[in-house]
C-alpha cells in the first residue's frame, strides 16, 4: 500500500473532516471529497470503518478505543493460568503432543487440588469449543467411575488458547505398562476388560470418547492391583475437530498418531456417524496392539502415501487375524514380543487363535452395525473367553462374506441395505439368546435402550444435516436420496419404542408421586432426569422429522424430492425428447435464430421447451420443478397463472460493456453520459459471458410459497385497491439474501451474478434504461413510482412520474412490456438480489459467469429499481450494497447455467 | 535537569545513542520484578518505564539530553521487547510441539496476541514514513502507556493535537490488525 506523502495528507484531512460530519452523512461526504478516485475513497472509508471498531476483545487487551493504552507486566501469567473464576499454578510439564502441552498444575481457586492441565495450541476456535464443552458438562458431571479420570473444566486463556483441567493420573500408557510388567496374554485380557467396563459406563451417560488409544488409557498400580484409568473423556468432543483433509494435514501431529486406532467413519470424516461403536473400534485396535504388539492397520504415513491412501486402507484393508499376525513375526521381534507376554514365539499364536481372534475382529468391523453393540458385550465376551465359555463373536458367515462382496462392488443401495438390515436383525436375535439369566437380560436390555437412543440422536442429527445436500432434486441424486430415506425409515421405525420408553419413565414419576407443575416431569433421581430430558427431546425431534408436511418434516421433504427427481427424468429427457429436438435444431439454425449464432445445446435436465418468443426471437423454457406450463395468449405473450412455474429465457453468450459513465464518450456503442452515475458504477468495462438461462419474470409469491411453504412478502394477496386486487402473482419481496439464495439453490437455480444481471437487463441497450434515454419510455415498461402511487400517507412533491399506471405498490409480474430479451420488470416492481459481493468495478471478474472476484465480501449487491423509485433515481447501472441478512422489499430473478453438450452426453450414457 | 529541550523523537541519533542503555535497564527491571515480586502482582508498563527513568537518573548515569529523548528511547525499547517476545511465541507455535516452552521466560505477558503486536509494529513503521508526529503519539500512548495529557506534555504539543493524531493512528492500527487477521484467516 505505497502512498506518497501528499496523498497521505489528503487521507488524513478527509478522515478528520469526515469524523466531524454526522455518522450517516460520512460516506456521502467522503465520496464527494474523493470525487471519482475510488481507491482514495476506499482508503479513507476503511480507516473510518476501523475508527469505530475495536479489533481487540475489550477489557483484556490494550485499549486503543479510549482509555490510555496499557500493557501489563504480569508475572503470574507465566506460571499460572486463570480465567477469572478458576486459577491454576503450573508445576511441571507432563507431556507434549501435536495438540499442545500437558502441565501438572495446582488449582488454587475455587478449590485446591492437583490437576493435569491440557493447554491446546492456538488455532482451535476456543469460544466454540468451550461452548461445546459446556453443553456436555451435565453429562460429564454424571460420569463417576473409578477407571475414568474426571474432566473438571474447559476454558480459554487470555491469548485464546483452550485448556482442559482433568484429574491428574500418574500412570503409564496401558501398552507400556503391560510390557514393563511382562503381563501374559490372559492378564492383559483381564485388564482390558476393565477398560471396556469404564467405556461402557461413559457410553451409558451419553459420552463418546472418540480418541481412545493406549496413551489415553493410563495404568497405575494401586496396592498390588493394576488400575487402568481412561483420560480425556469429553475432550475430543469439545474440540470437535472437523477432520477434513485440510486439518488432517495442518494437524499432522494429531492425526498420524491416532490413525492406527481410527475407525473408518472417522477417517472418512463422516463425523456425524460417530457413535458409541466408534469407541468399540478403537477398543478393538488397542486390544489388538496389547496382544500382538502391533496395530491392526499398519501405521501409514501421510507423507508417504497421501491422505486418500490412508483413508482407503482404513476403509478397505482387512486386518490380519491376531494369531496370523503373531505367526508372521520374524526373528528378534518374534522373540521379544513373545517374551514380553511371558511366552515363546511358537505358543503366542496358539493363545490368540480362536476366541480372541474373533473378538478383536468383531470390534474392528468396518461396518458399525457388525461391531459389538456395546462395550459391555465386548467385556462379557472377553470374560467368557477367560472362563472358557463360548463367545458371541465367531468367524464370518458365508452370508456376510457375500454381503461384503456386494458392497464392495457397489450394486444398488437398496439391495445392500436390505442385506444389512437382515444382518442387524440376526445379530439382535443371537445376542439375546446368549444372555441367559432373566435379570441379566433386563439390565442388558435397558442398557441397549439407552445406547440405541444415544446413537439414534446422532443418526438424526446426521440425517438432518444431510437434507440440504440432497438438492436440487436431480436424477443424479436419486440414489443418494433413496439411501437417505432407507436410513430415515429405519430410524423412524424405532420411534414407537422410544415413545414407549418415555411413557415408562413418565409412569415412574407418577408412581413416586413427584409431579412437576409444568410440562417437564421432575425426577427424584438425577440419572432418570437426565435420561428423561434427553429422551423427550429425541422423541419430539423424531416426531418433527417424520411430519407429513414436507415444509416441516425432512422425511416428507426428501420423499417429495425423490418423486420429483424420478418424474423429471422421464418428462424432460424422454417424453419431451421431440420438443427438445425441435428446440435444439432451431437454436443451432442461424437463419431462424440469428441471436444464438449457431449455438449447439443439449436437452437440459428439468427444463421443458415452451417455444421461441415471437418478439425477442429467443427460446423459452419451463423450469418444471417450480410449477406448470404457461399458456400462450393470442397476442403471443405467455399467460401467467398462480400455478405457473419459473420461465427461463436462454440468452446467447456475448461480450458487453458493463457499468455507467458520466463522461460523454464519442462511442455510441458504450454506456455513457449519465450524470446520475455514482462512483461505484464507473468505470465502464468489458465483460464476456457464456450462454445462460435467466428467469423471464421476478419470482412470484405463489412460486415462493409453493416451494417453501412461506410467503414473507409485505404486500399481502387480497388487498383491494379498487382498480386491482393484489394476488400471489405479485413478486415475492421482503427477502434477505440468504433466503433468496436458499430458494434458488433449493430448486436447482442460482442468483445471477451482477454481470449476468446487467447483461440481461440491458438486452443490448447502452442507454440509461433498456427502453432508451427518455424517462417517458418507462411508463409502459416499468412499474415505478408514478402518480397512482401517490396515495395518502406517502410524501407529496413533484418527484412522482407524470403518468398513472394504476398500481399503488407492486404489480403482478409480467404486466408491463418486456425488454429486448423478453424479460419483464427489470427496472421496476421490486429490486433484485444478485449473487455477487459488493466491490469495485476495478476488481476482475471470473470468465464464464462474470462473478466479481475479491473485494471486502461483506455485503451483497442488489440491482434494478422498484415501485417506490422516483423516475430521477431509476438507472440501469444503479448498484446497492446490503448485508446478506438484511430484509427489504427485495425480490429475485434466478438464473441457471447452460449444461454443456459433453456433460449432458456423458450423463446420458452413464 | 533538562538541558536542550527537543520535544519529539525526531532527534534520531540522540535516541539511538541512549537506546541500548534504556533497553537493558528495562529488560533487567522487568526480569527482576518477576523474580522478586509476589505472585499476582501486575505491573503497568508505565510504572516500569518510570522506574527505569528514576534508576538511571539517580545512578547519575542519565545519558539523555531531554526527557523526551528518554521516553522515545523507552518506547522504542518496549516495542523491541514486545516484538522479541511476539516473534519467539510465533516461532514456538510454528515449531509445533517440538520446542519445550520455557515457562520462566514468559516474564512479560503480551495482552495482545503476538500476531497483532507484529502487525502494529509494521503499521507503525509505515505511519512513521508519512508522519513522524503521529508515529510518536503511537509510541508513547501505546508502547509506554501515557495518557493524552502526558503524551502532549512530552511531545510539546496540545492535547487536542494528540487526540486528533491518536484518533487517526488508532484507525490506522486497527485496520492493520484486522487485515493481518484476515490474511492469517483468524478472527
Image (tube, coloured by chain):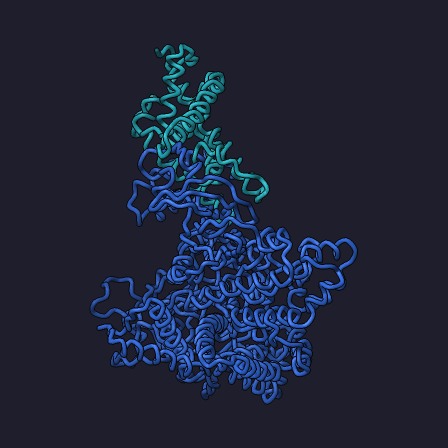
Nearer to the camera, A874 or A461: A461
Q: Is residue A311 left or right of residue A571?
A: right
x, y (%) of residue A55? 40, 44
Asked whether the viewer can see residue A451, the reply is yes
Chain shaded cyan? B
Q: Is residue A176 above or below residue A898?
A: above
Q: Residue at x 42, y 73 (%)?
A: A698
Nearer to the camera, A48 or A424: A424
* Residue A876 occupies quadrant: bottom left
* Residue A904 occupies quadrant: bottom right
x, y (%) of residue A650? 55, 75
x, y (%) of residue A618? 55, 77
Nearer to the camera, A80 or A437: A437
Nearer to the camera, B70 or B153: B70
Asked whether the viewer can see residue A590, the reply is no
Residue, far left? A792
Chain shaded blue? A
x, y (%) of residue B124? 46, 33
Q: Residue at x 45, y 45 (%)?
A: B178
Q: Is residue A806 above or below residue A177?
A: below
Q: Residue at x 39, y 34 (%)?
A: A74
Amino acid at each position: 500500500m505505497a502512498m506518497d506523502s501528499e496523498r497521505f495528507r489528503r487521507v488524513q484531512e478527509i478522515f478528520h473532516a469526515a469524523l466531524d460530519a454526522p455518522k450517516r452523512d460520512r460516506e456521502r461526504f467522503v465520496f464527494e471529497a474523493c470525487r471519482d478516485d475510488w481507491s482514495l475513497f476506499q482508503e479513507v472509508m476503511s480507516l473510518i470503518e476501523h475508527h469505530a471498531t475495536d479489533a481487540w476483545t475489550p477489557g483484556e487487551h490494550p485499549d486503543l478505543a479510549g482509555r490510555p493504552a496499557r500493557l501489563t507486566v504480569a508475572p503470574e501469567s507465566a506460571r499460572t493460568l486463570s480465567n477469572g473464576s478458576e486459577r491454576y499454578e503450573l508445576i511441571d510439564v507432563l507431556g507434549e503432543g501435536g495438540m499442545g502441552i500437558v502441565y501438572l498444575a495446582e488449582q488454587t481457586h475455587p478449590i485446591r487440588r492437583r490437576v493435569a492441565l491440557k493447554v491446546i495450541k492456538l488455532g482451535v476456535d476456543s469460544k466454540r469449543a468451550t461452548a461445546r464443552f459446556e453443553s456436555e458438562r451435565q453429562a460429564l458431571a454424571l460420569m463417576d467411575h473409578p477407571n475414568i479420570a474426571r474432566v473438571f473444566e474447559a476454558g480459554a486463556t487470555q491469548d485464546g488458547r483452550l485448556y482442559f483441567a482433568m484429574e491428574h493420573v500418574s500412570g503409564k500408557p496401558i501398552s507400556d505398562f503391560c510390557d514393563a510388567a511382562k503381563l501374559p496374554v490372559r492378564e492383559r485380557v483381564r485388564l482390558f476388560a476393565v477398560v471396556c467396563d469404564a467405556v461402557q459406563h461413559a457410553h451409558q451417560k451419553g459420552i463418546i470418547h472418540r480418541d481412545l488409544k493406549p496413551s489415553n488409557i493410563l495404568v497405575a498400580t494401586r496396592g498390588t492391583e493394576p488400575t487402568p484409568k481412561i483420560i480425556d473423556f469429553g475432550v475430543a468432543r469439545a474440540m470437535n475437530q472437523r477432520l477434513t483433509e485440510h486439518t488432517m494435514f495442518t494437524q499432522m501431529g494429531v492425526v498420524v498418531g491416532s490413525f492406527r486406532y481410527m475407525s473408518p467413519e472417522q477417517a472418512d470424516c463422516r463425523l456425524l456417524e460417530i457413535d458409541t461403536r466408534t469407541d468399540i473400534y478403537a477398543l478393538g485396535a488397542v486390544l489388538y496392539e496389547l496382544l500382538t504388539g502391533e496395530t491392526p492397520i499398519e501405521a501409514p504415513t501421510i507423507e508417504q502415501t497421501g491422505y486418500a491412501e490412508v483413508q482407503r486402507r482404513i476403509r478397505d484393508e482387512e486386518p490380519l487375524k491376531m494369531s496370523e499376525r503373531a505367526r508372521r513375526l520374524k526373528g528378534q521381534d518374534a522373540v521379544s514380543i513373545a517374551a514380553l507376554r511371558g511366552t515363546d514365539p511358537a505358543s503366542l499364536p496358539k493363545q490368540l487363535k480362536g476366541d480372541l481372534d474373533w473378538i478383536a475382529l468383531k470390534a474392528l468391523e468396518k461396518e458399525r452395525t457388525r461391531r459389538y453393540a456395546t462395550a459391555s458385550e465386548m467385556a462379557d465376551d472377553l470374560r467368557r473367553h477367560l472362563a472358557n465359555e463360548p463367545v458371541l463373536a465367531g468367524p464370518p458367515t458365508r452370508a456376510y462374506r457375500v454381503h461384503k462382496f456386494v458392497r464392495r462392488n457397489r450394486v444398488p443401495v437398496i439391495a445392500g441395505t436390505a442385506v444389512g438390515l437382515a444382518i442387524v436383525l440376526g445379530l439382535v436375535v443371537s445376542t439375546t439368546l446368549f444372555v441367559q439369566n432373566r435379570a441379566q437380560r433386563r439390565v442388558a436390555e435397558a442398557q441397549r435402550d439407552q445406547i440405541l437412543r444415544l446413537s439414534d440422536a446422532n443418526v438424526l442429527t446426521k440425517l438432518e444435516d444431510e437434507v440440504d445436500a440432497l438438492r436440487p432434486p436431480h436424477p443424479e441424486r436419486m440414489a443418494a436420496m433413496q439411501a437417505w430415506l432407507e436410513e430415515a425409515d429405519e430410524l423412524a421405525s424405532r420411534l414407537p419404542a422410544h415413545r414407549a420408553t418415555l411413557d415408562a419413565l413418565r409412569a415412574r414419576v407418577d408412581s413416586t408421586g413427584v409431579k412437576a407443575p409444568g410440562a417437564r416431569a421432575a425426577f427424584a433421581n438425577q440419572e432418570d432426569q437426565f435420561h428423561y430430558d434427553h429422551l423427550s427431546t429425541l422423541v419430539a425431534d423424531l416426531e418433527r422429522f417424520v411430519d407429513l408436511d414436507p415444509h416441516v418434516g425432512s422425511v416428507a421433504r426428501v420423499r417429495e424430492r425423490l418423486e420429483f427427481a424420478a418424474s423429471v427424468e422421464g418428462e424432460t429427457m424422454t417424453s419431451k425428447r421431440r420438443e427438445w429436438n425441435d428446440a435444439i435444431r432451431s437454436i443451432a439454425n442461424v437463419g431462424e435464430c440469428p441471436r444464438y449464432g449457431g449455438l449447439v445445446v443439449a436437452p437440459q435436465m428439468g427444463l421443458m421447451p415452451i417455444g421461441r418468443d415471437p418478439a425477442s426471437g429467443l427460446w423459452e423454457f419451463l423450469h418444471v420443478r417450480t410449477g406448470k406450463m404457461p399458456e400462450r395468449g393470442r397476442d403471443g405473450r405467455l399467460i401467467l397463472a398462480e400455478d405457473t412455474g419459473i420461465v427461463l429465457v436462454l440468452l446467447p453468450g456475448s461480450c458487453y460493456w458493463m457499468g455507467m459513465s458520466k463522461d460523454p464518450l464519442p462511442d455510441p456503442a458504450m454506456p455513457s453520459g449519465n450524470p446520475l452515475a455514482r462512483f461505484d458504477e464507473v468505470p465502464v468495462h468489458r465483460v464476456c459471458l457464456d450462454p445462460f438461462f435467466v428467469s423471464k419474470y421476478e419470482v412470484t409469491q405463489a412460486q415462493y410459497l409453493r416451494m417453501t411453504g412461506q410467503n414473507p412478502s409485505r404486500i399481502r394477496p387480497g388487498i383491494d385497491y379498487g382498480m386491482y386486487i393484489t394476488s400471489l402473482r405479485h413478486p415475492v419481496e421482503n427477502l434477505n439474501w440468504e433466503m433468496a439464495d436458499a430458494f434458488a439453490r433449493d430448486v436447482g437455480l442460482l442468483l445471477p451474478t451482477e454481470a449476468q444481471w446487467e447483461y440481461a437487463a440491458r438486452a443490448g441497450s447502452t442507454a440509461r434504461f433498456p427502453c432508451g434515454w427518455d424517462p417517458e419510455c418507462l411508463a409502459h415498461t416499468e412499474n415505478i413510482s408514478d402518480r397512482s402511487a401517490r396515495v395518502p400517507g406517502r410524501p407529496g412533491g413533484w418527484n412522482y412520474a407524470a403518468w398513472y399506471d394504476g398500481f399503488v405498490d407492486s404489480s403482478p409480474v409480467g404486466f408491463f412490456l418486456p425488454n429486448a430479451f423478453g424479460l419483464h420488470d427489470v427496472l421496476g416492481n421490486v429490486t433484485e438480489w444478485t449473487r455477487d459481493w459488493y466491490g469495485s468495478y476495478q476488481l476482475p471478474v471470473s470468465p464464464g459467469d462474470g462473478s466479481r472476484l475479491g473485494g471486502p465480501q461483506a455485503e451483497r449487491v442488489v440491482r434494478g429499481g422498484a415501485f417506490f423509485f422516483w423516475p430521477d433515481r431509476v438507472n440501469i447501472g444503479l448498484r446497492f450494497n446490503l448485508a446478506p441478512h438484511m430484509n427489504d422489499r427485495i425480490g429475485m430473478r434466478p438464473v441457471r447455467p447452460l449444461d454443456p453438450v459433453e456433460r449432458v452426453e456423458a450423463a446420458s450414457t452413464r | 535537569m533538562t538541558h536542550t529541550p527537543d520535544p519529539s523523537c525526531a532527534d534520531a541519533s540522540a535516541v539511538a545513542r541512549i537506546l541500548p542503555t534504556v533497553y537493558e535497564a528495562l529488560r533487567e527491571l522487568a526480569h527482576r520484578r518477576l523474580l522478586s515480586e509476589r505472585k499476582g502482582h501486575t505491573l503497568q508498563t508505565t510504572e516500569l518505564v518510570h522506574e527505569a527513568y528514576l534508576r538511571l537518573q539517580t545512578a547519575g548515569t542519565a545519558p539523555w539530553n531531554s526527557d523526551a529523548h528518554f521516553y522515545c528511547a523507552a518506547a522504542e525499547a518496549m516495542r523491541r521487547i514486545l516484538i522479541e517476545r511476539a516473534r519467539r511465541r510465533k516461532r514456538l507455535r510454528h515449531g509445533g510441539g517440538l520446542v519445550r516452552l520455557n515457562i520462566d521466560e514468559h516474564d512479560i505477558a503480551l495482552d495482545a496476541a503476538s500476531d497483532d503486536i507484529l502487525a502494529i509494529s509494521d503499521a507503525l513503521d509505515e505511519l512513521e514514513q508519512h508522519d513522524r508526529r503521529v508515529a510518536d503519539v503511537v509510541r508513547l500512548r501505546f508502547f509506554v502507556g501515557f495518557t493524552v495529557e502526558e503524551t502532549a506534555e512530552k511531545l510539546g504539543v496540545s492535547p487536542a493535537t494528540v487526540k486528533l493524531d491518536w484518533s487517526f493512528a488508532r484507525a490506522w492500527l486497527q485496520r492493520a490488525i484486522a487485515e493481518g487477521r484476515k490474511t492469517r484467516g483468524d478472527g
